[in-house]
C-alpha cells in the first residue's frame, strides 16, 4: 500500500541532567540522527487501524483504540488523542513503522514513535500543529495513555532540537537555549546490549520518592532546593535523601556543564558527565554493572567523561571523546566488553 503521509521523530542522547525533568530542573539533551518513521496509508478493507513495524514483524489489527500494554500503545494513543483534539474519528488507516533508532536503550524511542505518528496524522488530516501543541500532545499520550511518568525533555528535544546543538532546557518554565557542541569531539553512544529492566513501576517509584521528599520539605518540586540542610536530612528517609541528593546536585552540575560547553572546555564538561554517572549509580540507584563497566572502560581508554543516558536500568552510555580517538576507543571497548554496540 502506498504511503500517503509520512512523519519522522528523532531520538536523543542526554548529555547531563538525568531524572530532573519531572523535578522542575534543567537538562541538556542532544537530538541524534537516528529516527523513527511512520508511514500512513488508507486501507478500505479494515474497520479501525492496522500497524506493522520492521522491528516486530507481526501485523497488528486493532479493532478499537484502547490500551494493549505493548509498544503499539504509542500509535493507538496517538490516534485516540489526536482524534479527540480535532474531533475526528480515526479509521481505515494502516501505519507502517520503520525504526532507525534502537528501541528501549535510553535514546527516547517512545517520544520518537509518538512524534512520528502525530506528524503523519497531522499531515494526513491537514492539521497544522504548532511545535508546542505537538510536544504537549506527545507528552499527554505518554503520561496519560501509555502510563510512563517521565518529564517533557524527550518530546521537547525531538521537536525543537537539532544534531549540532545541545538543548539547554529549564523544565520548570520551558525556556530553552540551543548551544553548539564541541568541535572535534564526539558524543559516542555505546549500547550495553543487555536487556533493559526498566519497568514503569521502577521509574514511577523513583518519582514517588522525589514527590514525598518534596512534600516533607514543603517544596513544589525538588529542584527548588540548592542545598540539603541538616534539618532536611532529619526529616527525610534514607531513600528520600539519596534521590534528593542526586537531584539537587545534578541540577547544579547541568548549569556548570552549560558554562563549560559555552567556554569550549570539554575536559571539565567530561568530568561532570562522570560525576553525574556516579551519582546516578550511588544515589539515584538506576545504574547496572554493565553500564558502570562501560563508563570506567571508556574513561580509562581516553574518554573525557561518560555517563548512562536516559532513565538507566540498563541501556546505553554516552561518552565524550576526541574524534581522532574514537576508533581506538571502540576497539578497546570491544576487546573488554564484546557485547557492546555503537549507535
Ligand atoms: C526517561 C524519561 C525522561 C527522563 C529520563 C531520565 O527517558 O522519558 O523524561 O525523565 O528518563 O532523565
Image (cartoon, helix red, strand yellow):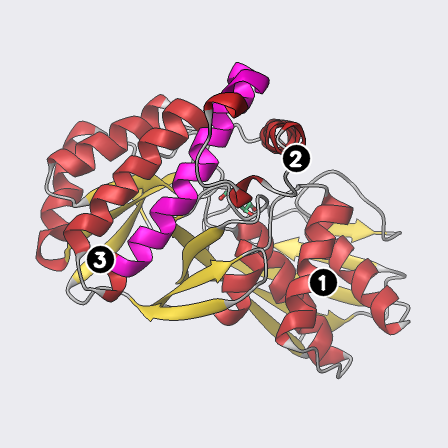
Front position in the image: 108 or 279: 279
In the rendered structure, the answer to whether residue 321 lies left or right of residue 17 reads left
Quick check: 7 above or below 153? below
- Whether 281 is among the magenta residues is no
Give x and y (percent) for residue 113.
Answer: 60, 57
Q: Earlier in the sequence, mark 3 or mark 2?
A: 3
Marks 3 and 2 sit apart, C-alpha to C-alpha, by: 41 Å
Looking at the rendered structure, the secondary structure element under dot 2 is: loop
- Mark whose residue sits in front, 3 or 2: 2
**x, y percent for residue 317:** 33, 41
Q: Which residue is mark 3?
A: 186
Return the residue at label 1: 137
Highlighted range, magenta: 233-259
Q: Which mark is residue 330?
A: none
Q: Quick check: 203 left or right of 229? A: right
Q: Residues within 10 Å of mark 1 (few under 14, many from 20)?
A: many
Above or below, 92 relative to 80? below
Real-space Cα separation, disc 1 to disc 2, in angstroms: 30 Å
Which mark sits nearer the N-terminus, 1 or 2?
1
Q: Residue at x 32, y 30 (%)?
A: 278
Q: Which residue is mark 2?
A: 218
Amino acid at each position: 500500500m502506498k504511503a500517503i503521509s509520512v512523519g519522522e521523530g528523532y531520538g536523543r542522547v542526554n548529555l547531563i541532567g538525568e531524572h530532573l525533568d519531572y523535578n522542575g530542573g534543567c537538562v541538556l539533551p542532544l537530538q541524534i540522527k537516528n529516527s523513527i518513521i511512520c508511514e500512513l496509508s488508507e486501507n478500505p478493507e479494515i474497520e479501525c487501524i492496522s500497524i506493522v513495524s520492521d522491528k516486530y514483524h507481526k501485523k497488528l489489527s486493532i479493532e478499537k483504540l484502547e490500551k494493549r500494554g505493548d509498544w503499539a500503545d504509542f500509535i493507538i494513543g496517538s490516534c485516540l488523542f489526536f482524534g479527540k483534539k480535532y474531533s475526528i474519528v480515526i479509521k481505515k488507516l494502516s501505519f507502517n513503522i520503520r525504526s532507525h533508532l534502537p528501541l528501549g536503550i535510553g535514546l527516547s524511542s517512545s517520544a520518537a514513535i509518538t512524534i512520528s505518528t502525530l506528524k503523519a496524522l497531522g499531515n494526513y488530516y491537514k492539521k497544522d500543529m504548532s511545535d508546542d501543541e505537538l510536544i504537549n500532545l506527545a507528552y499527554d499520550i505518554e503520561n496519560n495513555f501509555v502510563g510512563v511518568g517521565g518529564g517533557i525533555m524527550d518530546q521537547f528535544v525531538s521537536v525543537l532540537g537539532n544534531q549540532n546543538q545541545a538543548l539547554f532546557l529549564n523544565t520548570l518554565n520551558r525556556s530553552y537555549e540551543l548551544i553548539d557542541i564541541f568541535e572535534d569531539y564526539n558524543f559516542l553512544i555505546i549500547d550495553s546490549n543487555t536487556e533493559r529492566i526498566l519497568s514503569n513501576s521502577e521509574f514511577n517509584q523513583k518519582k514517588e520518592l522525589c514527590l514525598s521528599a518534596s512534600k516533607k520539605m514543603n517544596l513544589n518540586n525538588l529542584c527548588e532546593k540548592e542545598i540539603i540542610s541538616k534539618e532536611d536530612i532529619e526529616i527525610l528517609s534514607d531513600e528520600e535523601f539519596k534521590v534528593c541528593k542526586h537531584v539537587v546536585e545534578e541540577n547544579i552540575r547541568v548549569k556548570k556543564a552549560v558554562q563549560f560547553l559555552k567556554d569550549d572546555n570539554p575536559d571539565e564538561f567530561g568530568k561532570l558527565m562522570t560525576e553525574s554517572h556516579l551519582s546516578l549509580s550511588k544515589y539515584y540507584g538506576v545504574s547496572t554493572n554493565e553500564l558502570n563497566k562501560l563508563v570506567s572502560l571508556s574513561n580509562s581508554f581516553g574518554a573525557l567523561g561518560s555517563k548512562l543516558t536516559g532513565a538507566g536500568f540498563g541501556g546505553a552510555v554516552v561518552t565524550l571523546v576526541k574524534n581522532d580517538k574514537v576508533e581506538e576507543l571502540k576497539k578497546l571497548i570491544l576487546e573488554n566488553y564484546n557485547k557492546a554496540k555503537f549507535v
